[in-house]
Amino acid sequence: MNTNPRLSAFIRGLESSFVEALVMAKGRKSDIGEEHLRRVRRICGAMPECTEKLSHGEPTFFVRKKVFAMFANNHHDDGHIAVWIPAPPGVQAMLINTSPETYYKPPYVGVRGWIGVELDRIGDDDLAGHIREAWRMVTPKRVKTSGRGTA
């Protein structure tokens, strides 16, 4: 512990400046993806029983506690503004091979077949189709059969 008051004040000033710079950078990062987040929210919000909450620092979309989409805004400075969604077996490799500029294998969940979708490289109709399929994959049967799960 430092007992020099001048040095302590200097360190507190540095810490404050560092935190302020991080907040400003985070704000800019958020501004870049805000329009894309609105797109994802609009599409996911149309799915029956969709709820949104933060998970791992990013907006994440659930149906009955099961994740069907995660927004990723430059996650760990990876350069992607994307949505991560589960995909049926074999679809991840097919999409990445045919359109590597649009699809990629995201960290953490990519090993389970999820795909990352670059939001500036895909139209709303195609994005909505992928999100609907992801919702169908994780939604419990009783939600799908309740008459409301026809998204």
Image (cartoon, rainbow, N blue to C red):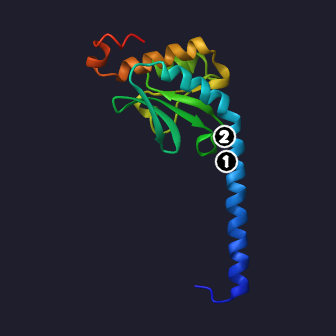
Q: What is the quadrant of residue 21 in the picture?
A: bottom right
Q: Label for residue 101? A: none
Alpha-carbon span between mark 1 and mark 2: 6 Å
- Tell me if 84 is positioned left or right of 31 in this view: left
Mark 1 crowd level (few <14, some 14–19, many ≥20, 10 Å Cα): few
- Return the x and y of residue 88 as percentages of the image width and height: 40, 19
Q: Can residue 72 be seen from the camera position used here? A: yes
Q: Which residue is mark 1?
A: 26
Give the quarter of the figure containing the C terminus. Answer: top left
- Return the x and y of residue 93 as percentages of the image width and height: 49, 21
Query: 49 and 93: which one is in front?
Result: 49
Q: Residue at x 56, y 19 (%)?
A: 97
Q: Which residue is mark 2?
A: 30
- Up/down of 38 relative to 12, above or below: above
Furthest residue in direction bottom, as rendered: 3
Q: Residue at x 73, y 85 (%)?
A: 6
Q: Report helix, strand or loop for mark 2.
A: helix
- Return the x and y of residue 31 as percentages of the image width and height: 70, 38
As shown in the figure, which amino acid type bears the numbered disc 2? Answer: Ser
- Up/down of 93 relative to 26, above or below: above
- Return the x and y of residue 124 as percentages of the image width and height: 61, 15
- Up/down of 131 relative to 2, above or below: above
As shown in the figure, which amino acid type bears the numbered disc 1? Answer: Lys
Q: Residue at x 69, y 87 (%)?
A: 5
Q: What is the quadrant of residue 4 in the picture?
A: bottom right
Q: Report helix, strand or loop for mark 1.
A: helix
Q: Residue at x 40, y 19 (%)?
A: 48
Q: Are marks 1 and 2 in contact (CB under 8 Å)?
A: yes
